[in-house]
Amino acid sequence: MLDENLIATLEQSLRQTRNAQNRLVVRLREAEGEVEHLRLEISALENSAAQTEKAIDSLLVAMRAGSRPMNIGRTITIEDETPLLPYDDAAPRTYRPESSVHYLHQSRGGIPSISNNLEPISNRFSDRTITQACTLLLRESGGPLHVNELYNLLVAGGMRFKGNNPTISIAVSLNRNRRFRKVDPGTFDLVMREAIQAAS
């Protein structure tokens, strides 16, 4: 009698285990189906993003061709590094060390240009993410910077970009991070700076 009760108890336990296992198998199949659906959505969004990047790139090229950048307006200093000046059209295509890096002033109507053939002068940003490096640059600048300015500084600091549209990568990274806010087209600042200014 004892053996029959024990067997009945074990059989009931076995049925419960099998039922739980079957429920988990069903949930796993549903999850795998959801994963595949998400992969398809991600792929579609990637295609859409690639087309948008191309459109933005074309617009930036057209804007650069249509408006000549204004001259130097403000400066920021790169900490512990030898900073560079942008190319001077009248001078040979080389950089020369100065005490600060000069940028265009956004309110004067010019979009800062991307410096071609820019070589790194340090490894300051080689092991940092875009958002980490941009946080440092925006703190040092004392004000907002355009993505083209950020790109020039990041490359000068040793950051390497893999894609064809690095400025779009910068803009997307900053847009997705709550630490930054967009203050003008292509121009970002730290949210913290606005909070500090409001408090003071």
Image (tube, grey):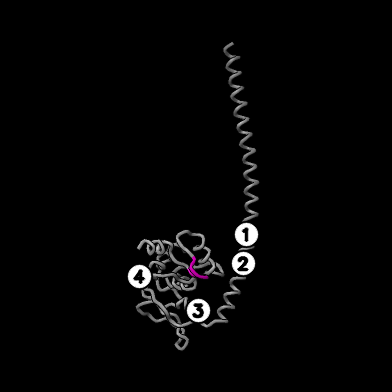
Residue found at x 38% / y 70%: 142
Q: Where residue 10 sits in the image (x, y, percent)? A: 59, 21
Q: Is residue 186 magenta?
A: yes
Q: Is residue 12 magenta?
A: no
Q: Mark 2 = which residue?
A: 52
Mark 2 or mark 1, which has the lower sequence index?
Answer: 1
Q: Mark 1 = which residue?
A: 45
Dot 1: element: helix
Q: Mark 4 = which residue?
A: 79
Question: What is the C-alpha distance between the residues marked 3 and 1?
Answer: 33 Å
Q: Nearer the viewer, mark 4 or mark 2?
A: 2
Using the rendered image of the protein, determine whether residue 29 is visible from the camera's viewpoint.
Answer: yes
Q: Mark 3 = which residue?
A: 109
Mark 4 or mark 1, which has the lower sequence index?
Answer: 1
Do callouts 4 and 3 mark residues in contact (Cβ within 8 Å)?
no
Left or right placement of residue 19 versus residue 189 in this view: right
User: Which secondary structure type mostly characterizes the magenta part of the structure?
Assistant: strand
Left or right placement of residue 142 versus residue 65 in this view: left
Q: Nearer the viewer, mark 2 or mark 3?
A: 3
Give the residue type at disc 4: Glu
Q: Where residue 196 sits in the image (x, y, percent)? A: 37, 62
Q: Nearer the viewer, residue 54 or 95?
A: 54
Q: Where residue 121 sits in the image (x, y, percent)? A: 40, 74
Question: What is the C-alpha distance between the residues marked 2 and 3?
Answer: 24 Å
